[in-house]
Image (cartoon, rainbow, N blue to C red):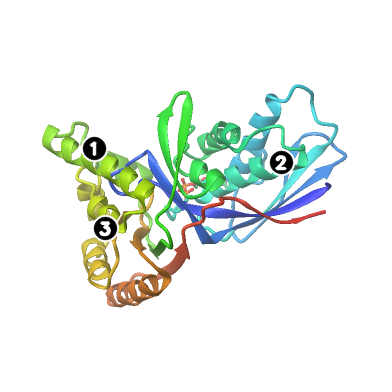
Amino acid sequence: MKEIEIFSPATIANVSCGFDVLGCCLDSIGDKMVLRKTDEPGVRIGKIIGEKLPMEAEKNVASVAVIEMLKDLKEAPGFGIEIDIYKNIKPGSGVGSSAASAAGAVFAANELLGNPFSSHQLIPYAAEGERAACGAPIADNVAPALLGGFTLVKSDDPIKVIELPSIEGLYATIIHPQIEIKTSVSRDILPQTVKLKSAIKQWANVGALIHALHTNDAHLFADSLNDYIVEPHRSKLIPEFDNVIKNAVEAGALGGGISGSGPSIFTFSKDEQTAHKVSIVVDKVYNKTKIPYHIYTSKINVEGVKIVKRQ
Ligand code: ADP
């Protein structure tokens, strides 16, 4: 194989009560990436279409992740790797733009190398790519992008990820208001201590949510999608957040929350038809504001990164 084209999906991190640990993979939002073998050794970015992002290999999360992966090969490959990125996921939107690049790059490079690593082994390399974007090797977006479905980051040092099933037929509706929330502001707004009462409610919900996924129980899933710790603070940064969730639930959504650190808001629905109904009411809420926005609906992608073409 000389070249591979892949679809690298957007992801929702911080799924409600699962702040920093629970994520899931989307299907209809994602980037195209093409990776090819080159005669010249090393890793470089060939082109980036759609967004202005670093072309330097040591700054782009895609090349950083592949460079980290190559360091662990027993022998250096007899070829170089060029990465083309066709960006559809806006950086800073909260649906894992940098994670899609990092996860997609290690997945595709692994294919070009003849798959020396398993999907789980690729996660720490992709997380090293994330370090280039946010300063820490976080896995809560790259894990669902690589594994599909829902994932739980059980520990981050060393990185240990548990794969979880999805609720059958589950759909997400996502609204991305085009506002900028500075990472420093979304971090500073969080309290440093948590009330024991809130913590108890939170871990009860995380446990129940995991049980709901394993037993395909949409009712329990809906009942567990509550975040008592982070959302009450961060939602203040997102205009109309409460209205979006209230109207979505009235239209049949199972619940929702802040995607990543925002500004995107996600909601889950039990099927495609409900997800579309939800997108209509969410559209009505944001239409009244002067803020530009995009709305997406997507089923949950249980595969993760997908191969489009090999040659
Ligand atoms: P998201 O949560 O949507 O990934 P972040 O704000 O965490 O958004 O990451 C975007 C940051 O990562 C930007 O500073 C961007 O320049 C940097 N970055 C580096 N390489 C990439 C890439 N290939 N794709 C997206 N962002 C990248």
Using the rendered view, name the quadrant where residue 244 is placed.
bottom left
Q: Is 159 positioned to the left or the right of 122 in the image?
A: left
Q: Which residue is mark 3?
A: 219
Tell me the number on the disc at residue 109: 2
Report if residue 4 is visible in the image: yes
Residue 257's x, y, as percent? 30, 55
User: From the Cβ of disc 1, is ligand 1 less than 8 Å away?
Assistant: no
User: From the Cβ of disc 2, is ligand 1 less than 8 Å away?
Assistant: no
Between 273 and 92, the one lying in front of the other is: 273
**Numbered disc 1: secondary structure:** helix
User: Label 3 is placed on what type of residue?
Assistant: His
**From what the image shows, is residue 51 above or below residue 74?**
below
What whole-number distance in Å separates the C-alpha atoms at marks 2 and 3? 40 Å
User: Label 1 is placed on what type of residue?
Assistant: Trp
Q: Earlier in the sequence, mark 1 or mark 3?
A: 1
Query: Do residues under tags 1 and 3 come within 8 Å of each other at their CB atoms?
Result: no
Q: Is 132 positioned to the left or the right of 117 in the image?
A: left
Q: Nearer the viewer, mark 1 or mark 2?
A: 1
Q: Is 116 positioned to the left or the right of 134 in the image?
A: right
Q: Which residue is mark 1?
A: 203
User: Label 2 is placed on what type of residue?
Assistant: Ala
Tell me the number on the disc at residue 283: none
Using the rendered view, name the quadrant where residue 19 is placed.
top left
